[in-house]
């Protein structure tokens, strides 16, 4: 079903925004991996609401509890269940949404599909669903880092027209986390924060781009046809709330080049096959080539705005609705750990698949 993701390293998320809690079941995690809630919590803290003046003020500790799959601080190889309690749900702020579909939200489409919806907080369509992804992604990142030497990182590349200058080969987590917008370019970050604050004061929202990178991925991960590495990354990123676009390597800019300009030429360096350029984004023919993997994800402006807009009621009559509740004026700062999580989930799954089929790391 659509609530699960992955093949060998498989996750199933569960829960609604204003229910008792949200969580994830991770199946296929290798045994004997040192793991406690302390390994998961840092990424959940980066994702949680209420962390700064440019995100939703909803107050949640988002404390992870591991319910199964570990013993004495190590994974057992059995399903790992992680639960996070919802503590600050205020369903009364959504009472009008019980009878009206919010513009550009999934209210109408969920109703059209199921004939019922959990309207408080958006139910399962809320970004709180991503808590399970981020928790599972923290485990995946630990496996990639400790067993394969792979580092996964993401950062805000652009907010509306404000673009950052980032060296994707050398950017560090400390630089990403040095400001509340999670942009490693300090000058651009300051402009981004001001723009987001201005939109919030106006009751509006902004979109932008998160760039993701993966360093240390060896050649050979991925599949040649339907499960191409970039195809699985695209599916992973476009499954995130508010995501609207994905490109890898040179992406859409490649249409401005000729083949001779775009080709990444091969050369031997240090006994390894390397490329002189990396317009492919570290992936060729759906399989990693050993170079840096990099891609971009476009996120739309948050759909909930504090202005009255035209909509339709559940009785299918024209009406109007003004946004209420607590919402992000821009999803990008909190989307960064989500992009990292989904990247790690794709890569660890392909790493295990590569081992299973080829017997290689």
Image: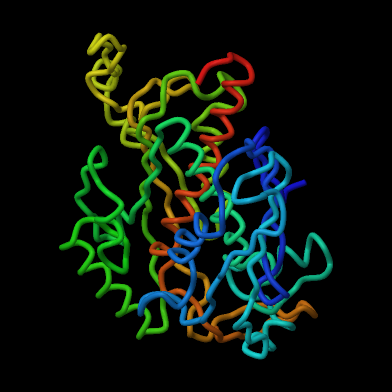
Judging depth in this view, the residue of 113 and 216 nearest the camera is 216
200, above or below 156, in the image = below
User: At 61% from the left edge and 46% from the top edge, which residue is drawn?
Assistant: 74
Residue furthest toward the right?
115
Q: Is residue 311 left or right of residue 166?
A: right
User: At 46% from the left edge and 59% from the top edge, which residue is drawn?
Assistant: 43
177, above or below 136, in the image = below
Residue 66 percent across, percent down from the top left: 65, 59
Residue 166 percent across, percent down from the top left: 22, 48
Q: Quadrant of residue 170?
A: top left
Judging depth in this view, the residue of 256 and 351 nearest the camera is 351
272, above or below 101, in the image = above
- The answer to whether residue 12 shows anywhere in this view is no
- The answer to whether residue 197 shows anywhere in this view is yes
Residue 86 percent across, percent down from the top left: 64, 76
User: At 23% from the left edge and 13% from the top edge, which residue is drawn?
Assistant: 270
User: At 55% from the left edge and 86% from the top edge, which residue is drawn?
Assistant: 324
Q: Is residue 58 left or right of residue 185?
A: right
Residue furthest toward the front?
72
Q: How is the image coloured?
A: rainbow
Residue 213 percent across, percent down from the top left: 36, 41
Residue furthest toward the left?
187
Q: Quadrant of residue 7?
A: top right
């Amino acid at each position: 079903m659509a609530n699960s993701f992955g093949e060998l390293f498989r996750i199933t998320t569960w829960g609604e925004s204003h229910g008792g809690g949200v969580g994830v079941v991770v199946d296929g995690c290798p045994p004997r991996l040192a793991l406690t809630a302390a390994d998961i919590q840092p990424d959940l803290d980066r994702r949680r609401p209420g962390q700064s003046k440019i995100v939703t003020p909803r107050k949640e500790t988002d404390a992870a509890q591991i319910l199964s799959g570990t013993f004495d601080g190590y994974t057992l190889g059995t399903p790992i269940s992680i639960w996070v309690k919802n503590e600050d749900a205020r369903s009364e702020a959504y009472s009008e949404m019980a009878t009206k579909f919010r513009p550009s939200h999934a209210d109408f489409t969920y109703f059209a599909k199921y004939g019922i919806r959990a309207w408080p907080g958006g139910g399962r369509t809320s970004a709180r669903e991503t808590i399970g992804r981020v928790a599972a992604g923290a485990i995946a990142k630990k496996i990639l880092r400790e067993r394969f030497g792979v580092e996964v990182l993401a950062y805000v590349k652009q907010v509306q027209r404000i673009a950052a200058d980032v060296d994707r080969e050398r950017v560090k987590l400390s630089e990403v986390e040095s400001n509340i917008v999670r942009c490693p370019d300090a000058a651009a970050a300051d402009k981004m924060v001001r723009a987001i604050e201005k939109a919030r004061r106006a009751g509006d929202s902004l979109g932008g781009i998160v760039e993701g990178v993966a360093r240390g991925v060896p050649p050979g991960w991925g599949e040649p046809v339907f499960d191409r590495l970039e195809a699985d990354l695209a599916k992973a990123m476009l499954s995130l709330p508010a995501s609207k676009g994905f490109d890898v390597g040179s992406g859409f800019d490649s249409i401005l080049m000729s083949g001779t300009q775009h080709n990444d030429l091969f050369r031997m360096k240090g006994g390894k096959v390397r490329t002189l350029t990396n317009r492919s984004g570290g992936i060729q023919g759906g399989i990693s080539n050993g170079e840096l993997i990099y891609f971009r994800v476009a996120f739309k402006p948050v759909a909930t705005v504090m202005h009255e807009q035209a909509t339709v009621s559940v009785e299918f009559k024209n009406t109007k609705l003004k946004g209420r509740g607590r919402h992000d004026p821009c999803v990008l700062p909190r989307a960064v750990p989500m992009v990292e999580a989904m990247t790690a989930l794709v890569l660890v799954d392909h790493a295990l698949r590569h081992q299973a089929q080829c017997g290689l790391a």
